[in-house]
Image (cartoon, helix red, strand yellow):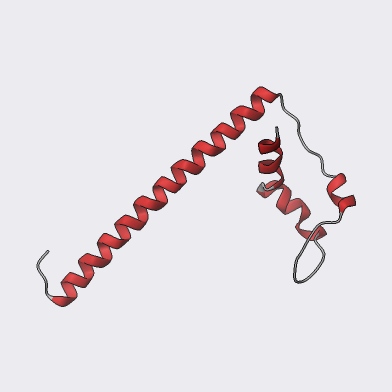
Amino acid sequence: MPEFLSRFLRSKLVVRQTKHLMTGNTLPRLQTRDIEKLLIPVPSEEHQLAICQEARSREAKAMQLQQQANAELERAKAEIEAILLGVVV
């Protein structure tokens, strides 16, 4: 499943393992031979799908929480501004 592979290759686990292998100052990249040596787990398609669904669900929840935090921050800014300007809220 391409989504599983993509998520796995972008995971912290893989990034930590490959960080020291990256070459190039401007555009760090891995050499093909290093990528070919990576051990990639291949769970059943059912498990891959479940993992991807859970990841998407967590990403959606994180986005929702980020939006809530931004809205709360904006409310707090407006409240502080009103207090500083002497406006009754």
Q: Does residue 26 appear left or right of residue 83 in this picture? A: right
Q: Residue furthest left?
A: 88
Q: Quadrant of the C terminus?
A: bottom left
Q: Which residue is at the front of the view, 2 or 40?
A: 2
Q: Quadrant of residue 69?
A: bottom left
Location of residue 54 in the rendering, given as x and y in whole percent from the top left corner: 54, 33
Q: Does residue 6 appear left or right of residue 30 in this picture? A: left
Q: Quadrant of residue 23?
A: bottom right
Q: Does residue 48 lie above or below 35 as drawn? A: above
Residue found at x 36% / y 57%: 70
Q: Residue furthest right?
A: 33
Q: Residue furthest bottom?
A: 85
Location of residue 17 in the rendering, given as x and y in whole percent from the top left corner: 76, 51
Q: Does residue 66 appear left or right of residue 87 in this picture? A: right
Location of residue 15 in the rendering, given as x and y in whole percent from the top left corner: 71, 52
Q: Quadrant of the N terminus?
A: top right
Q: Residue furthest front?
A: 2
Residue found at x 75% / y 66%: 27
Residue found at x 81% / y 40%: 39
Residue found at x 65% / y 23%: 46
Location of residue 47 in the rendering, given as x and y in whole percent from the top left corner: 65, 26
